[in-house]
Amino acid sequence: MYKVGVVLFDDFTDVDFFLMYDLLGRTSDSWTVSILGTNPEHSSQLGITVKTDGHISEVESKDVVLLTSGKRGIPAAIKDAEFMSELVLDPTKQLIGSICAGAFILYELGLLKDKPLTTNPDAKPTLQSMGGDVQDLPLVINGNIATAGGCLSLVYLIGWLAERLFDANKRRNIQNQLIPAGQFAIFEDLIATTIHSAELANEQNSALRETHSA
């Protein structure tokens, strides 16, 4: 049973957290999910309060760490010394993912310096101005780190996670109920192709880095 930690903070984007949490909750025999933050509870941009299961420092004990987003929440989180210092991540041992502006946190932690990443379109100029190599792609993978751009790209992020830990059948079992009636083949092709393309680009980029470092 894998341990998944979902990182939360005040003014998080409602759909990013709740859709992520819902998708993760569609399987109960594969992982346990803990909501982690700096406070006992955090409020969303729309004012919905969510209780946390533990302190953010517990991310070190998780197999998977996922970062949510927030137009106001992300800038505040990055400026929060406790939040950033306690968010100790290790991509050599963990799978790490972010949705939309959650990529800012990974970039600030130095995990995606000089590496391609993605975020939501509105946040792209700001992240580029910070030096981020932002791609116009829904999913970008770097080793064990995946960034997803746009709220609905959560289906790709959680799909990537399910395939990395299990297989495509696990992904389908999680996502099938989300797909509009009569459009399974369309969405299955889109989701599978997006994840495969991101993994292929990851392999190619890794090979290039190895060549340049040789």
Image (cartoon, rainbow, N blue to C red):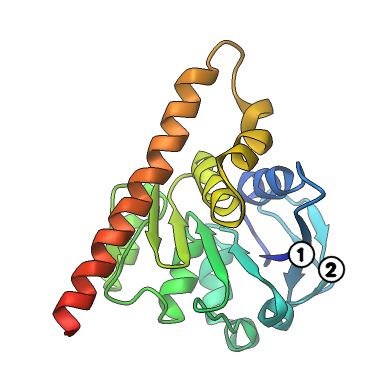
Q: Residues within 10 Å of mark 1 (few under 14, many from 20)?
A: many
Q: Residue at x 69, y 73 (%)?
A: 62
Mark 1 near mark 2, Cβ–Cβ under 8 Å? yes
- What x and y, as percent, mark residue 29? 81, 50
Helix, strand or loop at label 2? It is: loop
Q: Residue 177 vs residue 138: left or right?
A: right
Q: Which residue is mark 1?
A: 35
Q: Residue at x 66, y 52 (%)?
A: 17
Q: What is the C-alpha distance between the residues marked 1 and 2?
A: 5 Å
Q: Residue at x 31, y 52 (%)?
A: 200
- What amino acid type is highlighted by mark number 2? Asp
Observer-nearest of 162 and 38: 162
Q: Which mark is residue 53?
A: 2
Q: Residue 98 vs residue 139: left or right?
A: right
Observer-nearest of 99 and 79: 99
Q: Which mark is residue 163?
A: none
